[in-house]
């Protein structure tokens, strides 16, 4: 079976997407590239667009794409309480017919409010995936502790494994893959290079061994998301090139 490839709209850059007419304008580009899905970013939706999510969902379906929904919100607030916005975000994801809602972990504490979270998830039936972000909340020990808690308490939450974000957080992507692979359901593919006092995301090179080796440590059924910059005069051709590259790389991962 062919590996599912998802294109994150933010890969085109906020200004490019805005100038094109919003995330809906990128759907033909993504559909023509051969990708199966689109990751819609909430922070890139206007108030008007948020009020017309059913229309966006319809357009996504018209382009034969699957939707994923990403919100720039943590699951846990600085006081370690659950983020009260999560239920509304799950409802938005449901309206979009999204395959899942993606958020960051935030300040995961000792009391995870399991029953409240379980109730929220049951209300919509939309799966929740938690991504390692670029902060200390996304460091490997914290993500491991969350993974262990979810498994022990039977919480139906999986992980988005962002290849590059581990570097920002000061963790080893390879060690993270070894520790977290069983809980990974979605992979954000991007390379990163040092830039000033931090890193910047770049496209993976076909001959680069690190990202290819990292893929082989992760579940072969997990969809691959393109989150590195997609730039150039012909965005359809650029997107198609990287969709093909990732699909071939996915095939080379061991069964």
Image (tube, grey):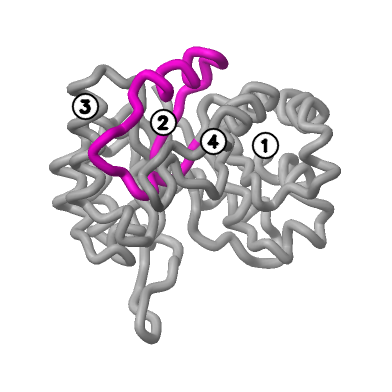
Q: In the rendered image, which residue does mark 2 sit on? A: 3
Q: Please report the bounds of the magenta region as a residue range.
A: 102-130
Q: Where is residue 167, by image quadrant?
A: bottom left
On whether residue 242 falls in the magenta region, the answer is: no
Counting residues from the N terminus, which is met first, the one under dot 2 or under dot 1? 2
Mark 1: give few (<14), some (14-19) or many (20+) Cα within 10 Å: many
* Cα separation between marks 3 and 2: 12 Å
For marks 3 and 1, the one nearer the N-term is 1
Q: Secondary structure at mark 3?
A: loop
Image marks 1 and 4: residues in contact by CB distance under 8 Å: no
Residue 31 is marked as 1
Residue that mark 3 sits on? 255
Q: Residues within 10 Å of mark 4 (few under 14, many from 20)?
A: few
Q: Where does label 4 land, which residue?
A: 84
Residue located 68% across and 62% down the image = 14
* 3 and 225: which is toward the camera: 225
């Amino acid at each position: 079976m062919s590996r599912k490839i998802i294109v994150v709209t933010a890969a085109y850059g906020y200004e490019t997407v805005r100038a094109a007419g919003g995330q809906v304008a990128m759907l033909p580009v993504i559909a023509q590239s051969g990708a199966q899905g689109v990751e819609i970013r909430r922070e890139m939706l206007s108030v008007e667009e948020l009020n017309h999510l059913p229309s966006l969902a319809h357009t996504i379906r018209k382009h034969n794409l699957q939707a994923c929904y990403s919100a720039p919100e943590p699951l846990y607030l600085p006081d370690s309480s659950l983020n009260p916005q999560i239920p509304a975000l799950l409802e938005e994801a449901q309206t979009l017919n999204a395959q899942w809602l993606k958020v960051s972990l935030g300040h995961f504490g000792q009391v995870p409010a399991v029953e409240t979270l379980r109730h929220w998830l049951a209300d919509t039936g939309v799966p929740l995936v938690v991504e390692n972000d670029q902060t200390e909340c996304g460091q490997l020990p914290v993500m491991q502790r969350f993974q262990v808690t979810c498994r022990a308490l039977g919480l139906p939450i999986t992980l988005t494994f962002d290849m590059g974000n581990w570097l920002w957080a000061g963790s080893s992507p390879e060690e993270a893959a070894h520790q977290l692979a069983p809980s990974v359901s979605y992979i954000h593919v991007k390379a990163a290079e040092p830039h000033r006092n931090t890193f910047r995301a770049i496209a993976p090179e076909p001959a680069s061994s690190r990202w290819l080796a990292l893929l082989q440590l992760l579940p072969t059924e997990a969809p691959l998301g393109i989150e590195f910059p997609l730039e150039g005069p012909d965005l359809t051709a650029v997107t198609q090139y990287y969709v093909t590259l990732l699909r071939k790389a996915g095939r080379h991962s061991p069964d």
